[in-house]
Every structure is written in C-alpha cells, then in structure tokens.
Amino acid sequence: MRVCACTQIRNVGTAPGGVTIDLRVTNQTEYRAWRETLNGIKRQDEGDGNVGYFGVINLLGPRIPSQRPLDKFWNEHFTFVQLRYDFINGGTGAQLTLGRVFLTFFDFDTGLSQIIGAEPAVEMMQMGPEAARLDLATATEIRQSADWNSQLTAEGQAIASGMVGSWTGVVNRASIYGIGEDNPVHPFDLTELQLARSVMVMFEQLSTFHVRYGINKCCTTGRNFLFGGCAPRRRLMNNPQALTYAQLPSACRF
C-alpha cells in the first residue's frame, strides 16, 4: 500500500479554548498520485504573500498501459482511494473531538481525455458514515447515485470491490467539464458555478471521518480533490431535516 504524501496539515482552525486544530490524512486502501507534490495545501499568490485556502488530494486516474510515462499506469477503468481524516490537537498531538464542524468539498468537474475518442474522466466522492448532512447548491451540477456500481463498468465494479467497509451514503459525481480558470480561489468568495460544483458536509461529535475519492473512465493524468471549511454562500438542503438558517454558524451564512 502506498502512503498518502499529505500526512498532516497544520493549523486548519481553532477549537474552543484556543486549541489549534491539525488535520491528519492517511489512506486505508492503495493510493497513487499523478503528482504527489500537489498534496497538502493548494498555494497561490495573493497580495504580498503566498497563501492557501484549500487542502488537496491528487489522485492518479485511469490510463492505458501505453500512455507515458509508463510508470504512471494503475489501471484503465476506475481508480479510487479511501482516506481517513483525523482532527488532531496541534499542541499535544492527541486526537481532538469537535462538537460540530462543516467542511466543503470543491470543484467537482470532468476532464478531457488524452486519448482520441475516449470519454471524459469523471470525479466522484462518497462520504463515510460519520457525515451527518450533505448540502448541495440549488442549481447544482453534481449528480448523485445510491452506489458506485450503477456508474461503473464491470471492470470498474471489480476494482470498487476493494473498498473497505459497507457505506450507505450517496455517491456524488461531476457532470460538467471544467477548466483551471473556473477553479475556486477563496472559499468565502465563490461564483455560482463554483457553488454548483461543491458539497458542504456537517459532522457532529467526532474526531475522525472517512472519504472515498474516485475517477471513472479512461484516460487522464490525475485529478485534484479540494476541501476546506464551510463556504458561507452555501444553499441549505432541500430536505426536511436540513438546518434552519439560524442554526448555521455565522461564517457559513450567505
């Protein structure tokens, strides 16, 4: 099993009592990247400094054996990784339980294939059983299915059988092609398009949660999966169990 390069992201927030929160990410299934150096914090120039607002996991996509470089072949049908995220007390290194926390997963889109005639690569994500609620934009581009197999070929289904544990949460997938110029720059300043490609998730009373990222269809290089804190312009869910506007943290209201 290959270890995820982004083992720990420091100072992602502050818990009650002024405790610094670190976020540790480890893989529970085999992991391969197109470019491991992209993992961690997505840095960008802003003003006089270099800042980062998003965490990123780079995942190697399906490729045919003849694509170069040859050492970047994993399989040609479907790639995925199952990750464990742990909140860590930045001062003591111990696991840290948080009462309620919102995380947003950004920029779900499809990418052009490098092989003529192949279908676009599709980014997919499933939250583990710890997720209390998912929030999509009203005009979302994200499509949801009850499981992975309904979206995969027989070969892809065989690969997905290696997922650890039985999760019942919906599988979110991209539906529209995206380019670098439409990527989010700041989680508190999202365009309608960027909102339509993001998912906000609520967790309660936990120190650990799990996520599966996948790329369906050949043939690409790799895809970046972005995550960060709550995005204030998120829409509330069209769900009878959705939070009311007043229940949202002030930073998450739009």
Image: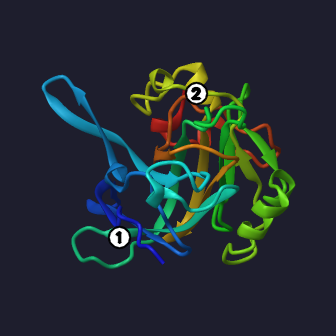
**Element on which disc 2 rests:** loop
For residue 158, above or below residue 107: below
Give me the residue at 72% from left, 32% from top: 117
Residue type for callout 2:
Gly
**Mark-to-mark CA distance, 1 and 2:** 34 Å
**Element on which disc 1 rests:** strand
Q: Residue furthest front?
A: 66
For residue 165, above or below residue 14: below
209 or 124, nearer to the observer: 124
Residue denoted by label 1: 88
Q: Residues within 10 Å of mark 2 (few under 14, many from 20)?
A: some
- Mark closer to the chain start, 1 or 2: 1
Q: Quadrant of residue 242?
A: top right
Residue type for callout 1:
Ile
17 or 68, nearer to the observer: 68
Residue denoted by label 2: 178
